[in-house]
Image: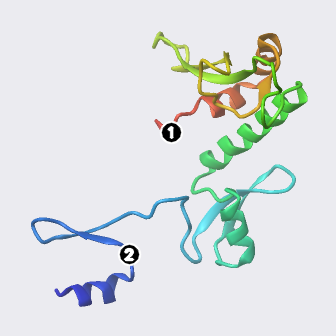
Amino acid sequence: MTLKEYIEQNGNNKIEIQEDGTIRILEEKGPWKPKNEEFYYTITNTGDMTTLCWDDDSIDKFRLEIGNVFRTEAEANRALHRLRARKKFLDAGGYEGQIKPNTKGWFVCLVKVRAAMPSPEYTLKPGCFNAVTPTFVVWFESEEDCQKAIDSLTEEEVKALCWTGENK
């Protein structure tokens, strides 16, 4: 098969020609995008999940642009719980944006714990701005406020924030 015939059959997918002469299709980077008439999950304006058929119209494209297109129900569910956790953090006195001058700043951080079962592999702890990379962009003025916000989370919200992409 010639390269021209291959492109005619497989479209304009990016490819790489291997040393042995075989062709490898390169995966597109970025968020997953459904094919026409493929079903996807989304979070509605009422906080529910629904399944829709991809039509590649402006509404589908907008949902994709804001990160509200999910391949599986589990992915959509995690996103929903992360949004609920963010709201709880803000309701508990957390701030978004730059840290106030002369403020230490505490963030919700993901910490790996010992693999002693049945405890989860990761947990959430307050972390100081200078010492950690935060899991969440919401920050608190005190460690106590940060811990209270963490303690207010449901089990599902904690799981969503502790999910690292492993064990889908």
Q: Residue at x 65, y 34 (%)?
A: 160
Q: Residue at x 80, y 36 (%)?
A: 96
Which residue type does callout 1 highlight?
A: Gly
Q: Residue at x 55, y 58 (%)?
A: 31
The nearer-to-camera label among 1 and 2 is 2
Q: For mark 1, give the secondary structure.
A: loop
The mark tally for this picture is 2
Which residue type does callout 2 highlight?
A: Asn
> Which quadrant of the figure has residue 92?
top right
Near-viewer residue (106 or 101): 101
Q: Residue 68 location, x and y as percent?
A: 69, 57
Furthest residue toward left: 20
Mark 2 nearby-residue class (10 Å; few <14, some 14–19, many ≥20)? few
Near-viewer residue (66 or 160): 66
Q: Residue 1 location, x and y as percent?
A: 16, 86
Q: Residue 60 location, x and y as percent?
A: 69, 71
Please give left or right for residue 141 compared with residue 131 in the image.
right
Above or below for 108 versus 14:
above
Q: CA distance from mark 1 to mark 2?
A: 26 Å
How is colour applied across the structure in the image?
Answer: rainbow
Furthest residue toward front: 101
Callouts 1 and 2 close, C-beta under 8 Å: no
Above or below for 146 versus 61:
above
Mark 1 nearby-residue class (10 Å; few <14, some 14–19, many ≥20)? few
Q: For mark 2, give the secondary structure.
A: loop
Of pointers 1 and 2, the one earlier in the residue sequence: 2
Q: Which residue bears the numbered disc 1?
A: 165
> Which quadrant of the figure has residue 14?
bottom left
> Residue 75 shows which numbered tag?
none
Above or below for 103 versus 54:
above
Q: Which residue bears the numbered disc 2?
A: 13
